[in-house]
Amino acid sequence: MSFSSQISKFFKRCAIVVDGRCGKEMFLRSSAILILFLLLFSYVSLENAGERLANELKERFSFSYQENEQIKVQLCDYFGLPRPKKEGKRVFMPAETLAQYAQGVLYKDVSYGKKKNQVLDVLVPLSIRKGEKLPVFVFVHGGTWIGGSKDELLYAQLGKEIALNRYIWVSIDYRVYPEVSISGMTRDLVAALTWVYEHIEGYGGDPRRLVLGGHSAGAHLVALLTVGEGALPPLLYKAVQKVLLLSGPYDLPAYQGTLDIRWEDVVEFFFLNLFEGKKNLYRFSPVYRVGKTPFRFLLMVGEKDELTPPSQTERLYQVLREKGNQVRFLLVPGRGHGGILLALNSDFDQRFPLELSRFLRD
């Protein structure tokens, strides 16, 4: 029976109730049916809206979207993994594949908290010598603050490059919206960093030599913790030496305009709830929190990144310099939002892995 015929049947039942030929039980049953129909109609509408919004995003950020799809296929072929069967499907790096590729020992899903997504991976290079304490690189994945995973192929493959530079690689998962807002995410990052500081010596790491890095939303979160004093507890603040920020949004009021597509009301509702209200967009924008720090920063973004345009990174670079911070800015030619991660892998590029090595080793 079609949706329209079901509705027609419902209203006929309602007419019987009005005529007084049906008792209370039929009225309650009819009301329940109406509620179910309304819920179904709302669900269908939301599903349709979600699909249309996804299509809008694909069209608006077409270069980065297609680049990501091409990179997934390229990496799947390189690692001998099955290609994704449909566009947009996430691909994950098997633990054994990463350990072999990075020539390291991988400790998977170590808990740093009690919640489901409060886990991290620790990759220890096989080159570590007995009694040696290596510096530690802590990475925060992206995912538009609503998704993403440390296990995604594009993120995990970066661990090899870090291990080649004789760092311990720590990649963290964290809770995302709508489970938590932006404040909850930063609390998870601090909890993960606290775990690293307290436990990484047991894995051969030096807790007093930390490098923090992030991509996209992860870069935004790392920037919130590092561009000024006070966001990190004093022991962690003293332990951090360098910060690598890849393709992040750092000026949220300006970034809101980047998402200025049709369905603005849907996007704005999500955006403002995530950042705890419009008045907090400046509070959670790294460019408005910059102070003088002891860290060395390396900022990178793809030339063709439409999702987090180069202007966002250039703005943070300028403010960091104005405050007297040590900072470098690299624009990656021909790359979009995800392509920058592949550009840092020496199996696929040469220039930027050398820049990364110089940053990590100097």
Image (cartoon, rainbow, N blue to C red):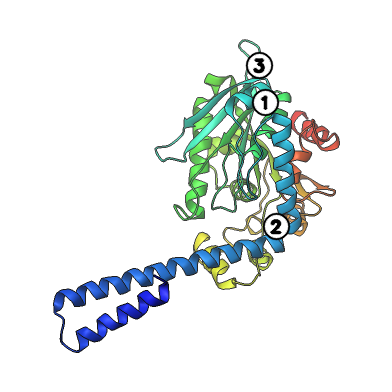
**Of the two numbered discs 3 and 1 in the rendering, the one whose residue sits closer to the viewer:** 3
Which residue lies under the disc numbered 1? 167
Three-letter residue code for mark 3: Leu
Dot 1 lies on which element? Answer: loop
Instruction: Give the spatial CA distance, label 3 vs label 1.
Output: 11 Å
Quarter of the image that includes the C terminus: top right
* Residue 125 in which image quadrant: top right
What percent of the width, then of the height, locates residue 289?
62, 56
Of 97 and 216, the residue lying toward us = 97
Is disc 3 placed on a helix, strand or loop?
loop
In terms of sequence position, does the residue under pointer 2 or pointer 3 come before the other?
A: 3
Residue type marked 2 = Leu
Q: Report helix, strand or loop for mark 2.
A: loop
The label on residue 11 is none
- The N terminus is located in which quarter? bottom left
**Residue topped by disc 3:** 126
- Neighbor class of circle 3 (other Cα within 10 Å; few <14, some 14-19, many 20+) is some
Report x, y in % for residue 41. Answer: 42, 71
Looking at the image, tell me whether mark 1 or mark 2 is earlier in sequence order: 1
Q: Which residue matches tag 2? A: 307
Left or right: 88 in relation to 198: right
Position of residue 269 in the picture relative to residue 71 (left or right)? left
**Mark 2 burial class by Cα count in 10 Å: few <14, some 14-19, many 20+:** many
Residue at position x 50%, y 31% in the image: 109
Instruction: Measure the alpha-carbon separation of dots 1 and 2.
Output: 30 Å
